[in-house]
Image (tube, grey):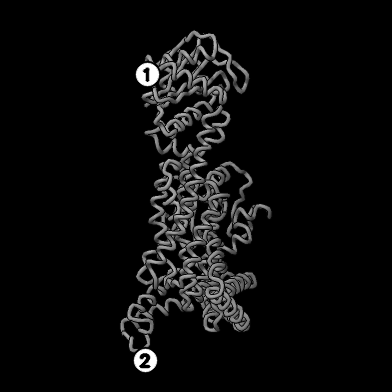
Amino acid sequence: MAKYTVIAATGCPTGIAHTYMAQEALEEAAKKRGISIKVETHGQSGVEHAFTQTEINEADGVIIAADKDVDIDRFDGKRLINVSVTKGMKEPDELIEKILNDKNVPVYHSSGNSSASSSEESELTGSFWHKMYVYLMNGVSHMLPLVVAGGVLTAVSFFWGINSADPKSAEYNAIAALLNTIGGFAMNLMVPVLCAYIAEAIGKRTGLVLGFVTGMIAYTNGTGFLGGIVGGFLAGYVAVLLTKLFKSLPKSLDGLKSIFIFPVLGVFISGTIMWYISVPMKDINVGMMSFLKSMENSSPILLGLIVGIMAASDMGGPINKAAYLTGTALLAQGNYFFMAGVSAACIAPPLATGFAVLFNKKAYTSKERSAGYVNFLLGSTHITEGAIPFAAKNPLLNIPIFMLGSSIAAILTYVSKISVPAPHGGFIVLPLVNKPFLWVLWIVLGSLVAGFLLSIVAGRQSKHDAEMVATPLGNIAVDAEPESESAETETSNNDLSEIINEDNIALDVDVSSRDDLLKYLADFSKKLGYASDSNAVYEKYLAREKESSTGMEKGIAIPHAQDKTIHNSAMLIAKLKQPVEWKTFDNKPVDIVISFLIPDQDDGSNHLEYLSSTSKLLMHDEFIDSLRNAQTKAEILNLFK
């Protein structure tokens, strides 16, 4: 059995996208570090890649990146970090670095007597608000399949008519009535299950028992999902309180506590409290639902704007989930219009990334283009998270663009009175939508607007990066970094061995000035057959130097020329017999020149990638030392290969 340096657990409430994106991010971060990692995923299909006790014992540390309940007691005595699943996606390198090298990462003890100080407690169990969110989302993740199943079955029953389940109606159909009844039972379980699994995350098995009973009271008394949430926290903390109160009882009575004392007292306490707070909770729930319903009629534009902003603000995070949870609650009460706008707002962002890639392919790397195409599929099935990498690339501009696209889709959906009776599924549930073609049209329209704007932003960013790479190495190191993804994925385009061979390398070049060297390179390019007019190439070299010097530091310059007389991309290297004066960062002369020849028909992308690859090599002092010490053309060629 393999020994893993680090083990990690990931999980999100819906268990669809965040779970596996965090898994991939952590695995990639570990791979870069050259360490072994095993990631246990907590998705909708259950726990996959579960740890054995041996794997836990042998691991150096544990990372939990989850927004749902993960059995933490297994990791007793291990160094442990507990954060949200979003951090697992966005900060995998920092988490790996921390668990490996930060001596302040605390040790978790299931007894609650952690070796950590209070300031370190959040590393073990997360912040207070993160814990509250995890408890809530544990309930949501267990509730969601019931709502989906119940909503879809109920919606299918309407194929026979809106009153097809009513025996007194002329539309009555026995099959429709059966589907409606079964779907109704599933939907009615929403509040008890939500309540029970919030309580289970807090108070374990006892909390689960108390939560089911408290949730049934909340449902029966009409408190809705708000009552389910309040009841879940109430039942969970009553279970915790009972555990503390009866902690001193002999261990021989543990069986009696779990079977008799805790359930009886807990159900009585939490049930009684919920019974008496049900009246105000019901009033709050009815008031909120009435307010939202009234907005559908009186202020559909404002409602669509709010829903669009919420859905696109954090792509499946807490704000997005708040809108979605409200939609499912209204759905359970027979309001199918609110969910239509929520679904539209959630589908638009990933579709927008696909359109952005189609609008401006050159602005995106190969990996980003592939992700954009995949997002057509993800978005059409109501999975918003595929848009996260695009949002993270330029959040200050891209997230507002996503909000705009989502808001357009939601507003038009509400204005058109479109209803969607299923809480998930995206375009899969189109047969259940009252105006399917119009709904798709509004979503595509919002996605097209956002996609067009995203492509413009990406194009400008790509152009900016190209300009930065074309300037001195100090700028390359900072501003060309986003192209590293392209350098890794499009190896066929930036493989320097494609544009250099031994004939392109000149040793002991005897020139007296920068311009003499540039003239030598121009003549050299014609001699090698890369260009047909050396004077034209020379003029382009000089023009480039007038814009800004291509002198770098440590005796290196990277002049380049693009002209219609250049037939093929090429890389020329010249080691000088004597250094020549050149405007450089460190004000030192140049004795090594790396030059690029670019055909006029090149759109700049290949040029950018070649420069980026070379700049990365030149960032390493050992590479520069090896280049300077190389005595033969073969040695130099091997360095760049």
At label 1, counting other C-alpha atoms closer than 10 Å, the crowd grade (few under 14, some 14-19, many 20 or more) is some
Q: Quadrant of residue 289?
A: bottom right
Residue labelled with disc 2: 168
In the rendered image, residue 577, in percent from the top left (x then y), is placed at 51, 9
In the rendered image, residue 531, in percent from the top left (x then y), is placed at 38, 20
- Is disc 2 placed on a helix, strand or loop? loop
Q: Residue at x 59, y 81 (%)?
A: 282
Which amino acid type is marked by label 1? Ser
At label 2, counting other C-alpha atoms closer than 10 Å, the crowd grade (few under 14, some 14-19, many 20 or more) is few
For the residues marked 1 and 2, what is the alpha-carbon distance in whole angstroms?
90 Å
Pick the residue in front: 510 or 437: 437
In the rendered image, residue 331, in percent from the top left (x then y), is placed at 47, 74
The quarter in which the C terminus is drawn is: top left
When the figure is inspected, residue 186 is found, relative to residue 513, above or below; the finding is below
Pick the residue in front: 22 or 606: 606
Please count the marks in the image: 2
When the figure is inspected, residue 206 is found, relative to residue 43, above or below; the finding is below
Q: Is residue 254 left or right of residue 444?
A: right
Whether residue 150 can be seen here: yes
Q: Residue at x 40, y 48 (%)?
A: 358
Which amino acid type is marked by label 2? Lys
- Is disc 1 placed on a helix, strand or loop? loop
Instruction: Say which of marks 1 and 2 sits in front.
Output: 1
Pick the residue in front: 37 or 218: 218
Q: Is residue 35 left or right of residue 278?
A: left
Residue labelled with disc 1: 532
Q: Are marks 1 and 2 in contact (CB under 8 Å)?
A: no
User: Which numbered marker is on residue 1?
Assistant: none
